[in-house]
Amino acid sequence: MKKNKLPNVLVLATTFPRWENDSEPAFVFNLSKKLASKGFNMVVLVPGAPDALPYEEMEGLKIYRFSYFYPKKLQKVFYNGGALPNLKSSWLARIELPFFLLFQFFHIGWMIKKKKIEMIHCHWIVPQGFFCAIFSKIFKIPLILTAHAGDVFFVLNNSFLIPFGKFAISQGKCCLANSRATLNAMCKIANRETPVEIIPMGVDLDIFNGQLKAQAQNIKKIYNINGPMLLAVGRFAEKKGFKYLIEAMPLVLNEYPEIKLLVIGFGPLEKELKGLVLKLNVGSSVIFPGKMTSCELAKYFTLSDIFIGPSIVTDSGDTEGLGIVFFEAMASNTAVIASRVGGIIDFIVDQETGLLVNQKDPKDLAKKIKMLIRDEKLRKEIAIKGKKYVEDNFSWETVVEKYYSVYRKTLIK
């Protein structure tokens, strides 16, 4: 790395905001902009989307969005629910996938040459991790690989992908996982002498300030909430397990009819989930406010009494790698109920920082929800311990310092 020159880093991702205040998950964006402020020239390459600019500069990042299908408004593989759910539900997305792979491969090579890239940071090991590994070898530039769970579990459950995942991991100068579950999956794919390091994504603690709750009080009036407020947030995708939470609601409402559950998000299963609410006749108690920005969501986190993440392991092996929404709920001083799957068990200690439930078990969910409603002391204790745990381990300041150290070491090697 030359002195007095900002190192050129190429960031690859397939989950990224399409525009300012987008409702798409922003963890790669947040990490990248904070690393840019540390002295790196961050060049981001992500898939294009209808109405998204092909190039823009945002908070220190140079963001390039490549199109992979025409007309652009028909691009379906990414965003609005995520690649795996979109591929499962849309025949057009499946048709577009080979074109995406071709265009992504071309743009990675083109970007490395044009921008004189000195290091690649790739999020997700397939497909872009495999492509980045090839170009890392060709151009002899270091590769940092970050796995986010869904990618490695998908590879393990589709054996034809294992050689691609193994090659990607083997070429990484540094391989990072967001949880122990993700780390274990990476090690199964490719036995490495160099251990995979765990660095989670972070949460913005500053937005959960003392004034937020007062600002959000009108939300309860809007939805006529006079009793306990339950909250669930995430993409309407199979691995989120919202179906089982909705199935638990009649059991909860039998004892606590004044409860309201707000399910915030969007995705391919929206129609199915709303249909289930009607079928179970809980429409007056289960509300779908729609997609929101992170700033809007913060108000709902702060107001809620209990946050519920009923995640599952799907038949394809997809599951919760970490779940930033859990950290946001805990940071807002809200008690959390979560399933014993994926990376969740890294930070939810049963009866301490949250309550754990069996996946795909509406009865267990209902039991734990009623337990926390009934026992206000336990609910407050869990909320306090959960908040402290997040503040101590998952602030962006803590996470970025770890990534900064990895970047420096990788560039110096």
Image (cartoon, rainbow, N blue to C red):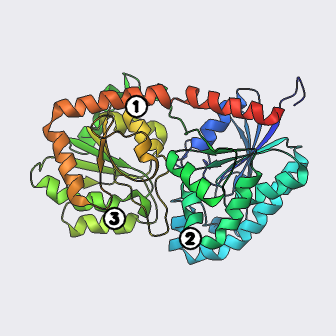
- Lower position in the chain sequence, tag 2 or tag 3: 2
Question: Marks 3 and 2: in contact by CB < 8 Å?
Answer: no
Residue 231 lies left or right of residue 400; in this view the side is: left
Quarter where residue 60 is shown: top right
Front position among marks 1 and 3? 1
Query: Would you place residue 287 above or below residue 3 in this image?
Result: below
Label 3: element kind: helix
SS at mark 2?
Answer: helix
- Give the residue drawn at x 54%, y 60%: 153
| Residue, disc 2 | 87
Crowd band around label 2 with a 10 angstrom C-alpha radius: few (<14), some (14–19), many (20+): some
Circle on res. 273: 3
> Is residue 227 among the parts visible in the rendering?
no
The answer to which of 232 and 375 lies nearer the viewer is: 375
Report crowding for label 3: few under 14, some 14 to 19, many 20 or more residues within 10 A (C-alpha).
some
Residue 81 shows in the view: yes
Viewer-proximal residue among 7 and 260? 7
Query: To which residue does mark 1 refer?
Result: 331
> Which residue is found at the position 60% from the left and 67% from the top?
76
Whether label 1 touches label 3, CB < 8 Å: no
Report the quarter where the N terminus lies: top right
What amino acid is labelled 3 in the image?
Leu
| Depicted 286 relative to depicted 43: above or below | below
- Mark nearest the camera among 2 and 3 is 2
Discs 2, 1 touching: Cβ within 8 Å: no
Q: Quadrant of residue 37?
A: top right
As drawn, 180 above or below 391: below
Looking at the picture, which amino acid does disc 1 mark? Ala
Residue type, numbered disc 2:
Leu
